[in-house]
Image (cartoon, helix red, strand yellow):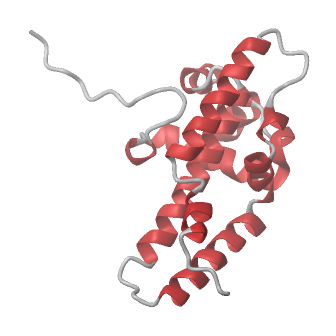
Amino acid sequence: MKPKRNVPKIGFPSDYKNLNKTHEKILKLAESLVGTKGVFGLELKSIASSLNVSPSLIHHYYKNAEVLIFDTVLYSYSKTIDQIQDSNKNEKDPEKVARAWIKGMLDWTTNKPGIGVILEFPRGVLRTGSKSAENSEKLLSNFMKDRKSTRLNSSHEWISRMPSSA
């Protein structure tokens, strides 16, 4: 019996804690491109060219640009949330935590405005005239589910638990 190999999960969403170097390079470059240029700034061929790899390597991880864009958004946002939470894990003052949360989110949306737009309007990622409209709707549905599971709505949940001032 052959020993099991530790093969990284390929597909959407990625396992962001266990990315191999190539996969991480793809996501970081995509994060930079989508963050500054939005959905029109990303093509699988341009990612491959920038990384000096074959386009088939990019297709190994992502079947199309839509999947890469959605995965990039989840990667970027979950990374930002983790950084905010890690930097405040020992903070006891709720006001300092709230200020750090707000600053972290403002910095993130200022530095990567294209990703923030996708979070608010994910349907804009879907290519019009796509041959697989049904698959696109399934992808969008999965993104919306994964967005919740990656704590993307945590700020809204956190704010809703705060006592209201009467």
Residue 52 seen in the current view: no
Q: Quadrant of residue 64?
A: top right
Number of numbered callouts drawn: 0
Q: Residue at x 54, y 21 (%)?
A: 60
- In the depicted view, which residue is nearer to us: 79 or 24? 79
Q: Residue at x 53, y 62 (%)?
A: 81
Judge from the rendering whether residue 7 lies leftward or rightward of residue 128; answer left or right.
left
Residue 57 seen in the current view: yes
Q: Which residue in the rendered view is the most extreme toward the right?
A: 129
Q: Quadrant of residue 99?
A: bottom right
Q: Residue at x 43, y 41 (%)?
A: 19
Residue 42 horizontal/vertical position (percent): 78, 38
Above or below residue 146? Residue 116 is below
Quarter in which the N terminus is drawn: top left
Q: Which residue in the rendered view is the most extreme toward the front?
A: 166
Residue 112 horizontal/vertical position (percent): 74, 60
Residue 110 horizontal/vertical position (percent): 77, 68
- In the depicted view, which residue is nearer to us: 115 or 155? 155
Quarter in which the C terminus is drawn: bottom right
- In the depicted view, which residue is nearer to us: 4 or 86? 86
Judge from the rendering whether residue 98 lies leftward or rightward of residue 90; answer left or right.
right
Residue 33 horizontal/vertical position (percent): 75, 48
Above or below residue 108? Residue 10 is above
Q: Quadrant of residue 111?
A: bottom right
Q: Which residue in the rendered view is the most extreme toward the left?
A: 1
